[in-house]
Image: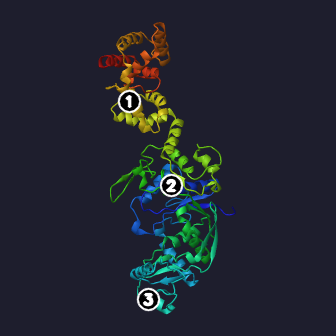
C-alpha cells in the first residue's frame, strides 16, 4: 500500500448503534491498526428529519466502552474537520456545481406529484419507473430546457434537485476486496439525486466528497451498500479523483431462519443487539445493551470479530491486540454470518474464567451489599473462585452462592428423597464430629468426616447428600467442605439442626 491507510466508520445518528454497525466499526479499526493506519469516525447527519437526540453521544460511548475508540473524530485530532456532515454543508454545493458544469449532473424540477403520475402510468403498463437515460430527456430537466430558463427558474425559488447523469451503455467492472470482480450495467441504474433545493447534499454526494477530502484509502462497509458502489465509483471518475478501495462485509443473519439481524430482533429474541442500553427519547422504551447485560467488552469484540472472519485456524480466543495482528480482509467471508446467542454467552464465560477472582469479587460486592449483607473482601474472593466456573455473567453469582450468606428456608423437593429414616440420627452424630474439630479448614474437616464414615462403615451417600441438603437447601454448589469452611462451624451446625427439625 503506497499511501497511508485511512479508514472511517460513518454512522448516521438515527438511533442506537446496531451490532452490525459495531462489527463494521471493529473491522475498520482492526484494518487500520494492522496497517499502521488511522481509524476515524465521521457523523453523517445530512438527513436532519431522521436525527435522534443522544444518538451521536451513544455511538461515541459505545466505541469507547468496546476499546475501539477512533483516532480522529469530533473534538479529537481534527486533522480534516469538521467530522460532522451538518457542519460541512457549505462545502458540497461547489462540488454539485462542478458536476453540472462538467456535464456529469443536471437540474431536475419534477414535482412529487409529477413523479407519482409517472410511477402510476408505468405500473398500469406493467413496468417499473426508473429515472434514468431512458426518460430523463422527456422529464422536467435542464437537459431539455435552456440554460437561461434553468437559471431563471432557480432564481425564482422553484424547487429542484441535482441528479447524477449516469453514462449509457457501459458495463462497469469493479473490484471488491472481499467479493472480487463485480459487474454493473449502467443502463439498469437510476440517476440518483445528489443535491436538494434545501441546500443539503444527499448521502451519495456528501459521502464521496468527504471521503476524498479526508483522504480515505479504503471504504469498508456493510453488504447493503454494494448497490451504491457503481454510483460512488462513477462520481470519483466524474471528479477526476482516485477512488478508494472497496470492501463490502457480509450481513449478520438472524439466529434462526433467513434474513438480516435487525434492531427489532434483540429483546424480542432474548438477547441484546445494541452495545449499551438505549432509551428511545420519543417512546420512552428501553432496549437492552451488552454492557448492562453483564457482557465484558473484550468478549463482545472477540465474538463479533469471528462473525464473518477467521484467521484460517481453529483458534477462537483473541485479545484485541491479537486481532490487530491477525486481521486480514482477504479472510472475510462472502456469505452472511449467523448470529449465535449461545456462542455469544460462551465467549463471555471464557473471559469471566480468565478474570482475576479479586476483580470479579469487586464487581459482585455491590450485589451482595444490596441484599444487606456485609462480608470481607477475602471471603467474597474465595466464594467467587468456587462458583465462577458455573456462571456466564457476574449477575448470576448471587443465585449460585446465596447459601454462603443466607440459611436455606426451604429444601428442594426432589432432593428430599435423600433424607431417610436413619438420616436424623446420622446428622446428630455428624454434629458431634464437627463440634470436636478445632482446625476448621476444608481439607481437615473432610479428612475427619470421611475417617468417621469409614470407621463406622457408613456409606458416603447416606451422609454427604443430606449434609449438602442441610447447608444449601439443594444438591448443588461447589465442593461441600469448602462451603463448610466458609460458613463456619457454628453456622454449619445450626443449619444441620434446622434441617433435622424441618425435614
Q: Of the residues tagged 3 and 1, which is closer to the observer?
A: 1
- Residue in the image at 64% along x and 69% along y: 174
Mark 3 residue crowding within 10 angstroms, few (<14) / some (14–19) / many (20+): some
What label does residue 402 carry, if any? 1
Query: Position of 434 compared to 180: left or right?
Result: left
- What element does badge 1 sit on? helix
Residue at label 3? 153
Q: Of the residues tagged 2 and 3, which is closer to the observer?
A: 2
The answer to whether residue 210 of the structure is visible from this angle is no
Ranked by sequence position, the earlier of labels 2 and 1 is 2
- Residue in the image at 55% along x and 61% along y: 221
Residue at label 2? 253
- What element does badge 2 sit on? strand
Query: Position of 345 compared to 6: left or right?
Result: left
Q: What's the CA distance linking mark 2 and mark 1?
A: 38 Å
Ranked by sequence position, the earlier of labels 3 and 1 is 3
Amino acid at each position: 500500500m503506497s499511501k497511508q491507510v485511512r479508514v472511517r466508520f460513518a454512522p448516521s445518528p438515527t438511533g442506537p448503534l446496531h451490532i452490525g454497525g459495531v462489527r463494521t466499526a471493529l473491522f475498520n479499526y482492526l484494518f487500520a491498526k494492522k496497517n499502521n493506519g488511522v481509524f476515524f469516525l465521521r457523523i453523517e447527519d445530512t438527513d436532519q428529519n431522521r436525527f435522534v437526540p443522544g444518538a451521536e453521544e451513544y455511538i461515541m460511548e459505545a466505541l469507547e466502552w468496546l476499546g475501539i475508540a477512533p483516532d480522529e473524530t469530533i473534538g479529537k485530532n481534527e486533522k480534516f474537520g469538521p467530522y460532522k456532515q451538518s457542519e460541512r454543508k457549505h462545502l458540497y454545493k461547489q462540488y454539485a456545481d462542478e458536476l453540472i458544469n462538467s456535464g456529469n449532473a443536471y437540474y431536475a424540477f419534477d414535482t412529487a406529484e409529477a413523479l407519482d403520475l409517472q410511477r402510476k402510468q408505468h405500473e398500469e403498463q406493467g413496468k417499473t419507473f426508473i429515472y434514468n437515460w431512458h426518460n430523463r430527456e422527456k422529464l422536467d430537466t435542464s437537459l431539455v430546457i435552456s440554460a437561461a430558463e434553468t437559471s431563471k427558474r432557480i432564481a425564482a425559488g422553484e424547487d429542484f434537485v441535482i441528479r447524477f447523469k449516469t453514462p449509457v451503455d457501459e458495463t462497469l467492472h469493479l473490484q471488491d476486496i472481499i467479493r472480487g470482480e463485480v459487474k454493473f450495467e449502467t443502463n439498469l441504474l437510476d440517476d440518483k439525486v445528489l443535491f436538494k433545493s434545501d441546500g443539503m447534499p444527499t448521502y451519495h454526494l456528501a459521502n464521496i466528497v468527504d471521503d476524498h477530502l479526508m483522504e480515505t484509502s479504503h471504504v469498508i462497509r456493510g453488504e447493503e451498500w454494494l448497490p451504491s458502489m457503481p454510483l460512488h465509483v462513477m462520481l470519483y471518475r466524474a471528479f477526476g479523483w482516485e477512488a478508494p478501495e472497496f470492501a463490502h462485509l457480509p450481513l449478520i443473519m438472524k439466529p434462526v431462519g433467513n434474513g438480516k439481524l435487525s434492531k427489532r430482533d434483540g429483546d424480542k429474541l432474548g438477547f441484546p443487539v445494541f452495545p449499551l442500553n438505549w432509551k428511545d427519547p420519543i417512546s420512552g422504551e428501553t432496549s437492552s445493551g451488552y454492557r448492562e447485560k453483564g457482557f465484558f467488552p473484550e468478549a463482545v469484540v472477540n465474538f463479533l470479530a469471528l462473525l464473518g472472519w477467521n484467521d484460517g485456524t481453529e483458534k477462537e480466543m483473541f485479545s484485541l491486540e491479537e486481532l490487530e495482528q491477525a486481521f486480514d480482509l482477504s479472510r472475510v467471508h462472502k456469505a452472511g454470518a449467523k448470529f449465535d446467542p449461545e456462542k455469544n454467552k460462551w465467549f463471555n464465560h471464557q473471559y469471566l474464567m480468565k478474570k482475576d477472582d479479586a476483580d470479579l469479587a469487586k464487581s459482585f460486592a455491590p450485589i451482595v451489599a444490596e441484599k444487606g449483607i456485609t462480608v470481607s473482601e477475602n471471603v467474597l474472593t474465595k466464594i467467587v473462585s468456587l462458583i465462577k466456573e458455573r456462571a456466564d455473567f457476574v449477575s448470576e453469582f448471587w443465585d449460585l452462592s446465596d447459601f454462603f450468606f443466607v440459611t436455606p428456608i426451604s429444601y428442594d423437593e426432589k432432593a428430599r428423597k435423600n433424607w431417610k429414616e436413619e438420616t436424623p440420627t446420622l446428622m446428630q452424630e455428624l454434629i458431634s464430629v464437627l463440634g470436636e474439630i478445632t482446625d476448621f479448614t476444608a481439607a481437615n474437616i473432610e479428612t475427619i468426616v470421611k475417617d468417621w464414615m469409614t470407621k463406622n462403615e457408613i456409606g458416603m451417600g447416606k451422609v454427604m447428600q443430606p449434609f449438602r441438603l442441610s447447608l444449601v437447601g439443594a444438591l448443588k454448589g461447589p465442593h461441600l467442605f469448602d462451603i463448610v469452611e466458609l460458613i463456619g462451624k457454628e453456622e454449619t451446625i445450626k443449619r444441620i439442626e434446622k434441617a433435622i427439625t424441618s425435614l
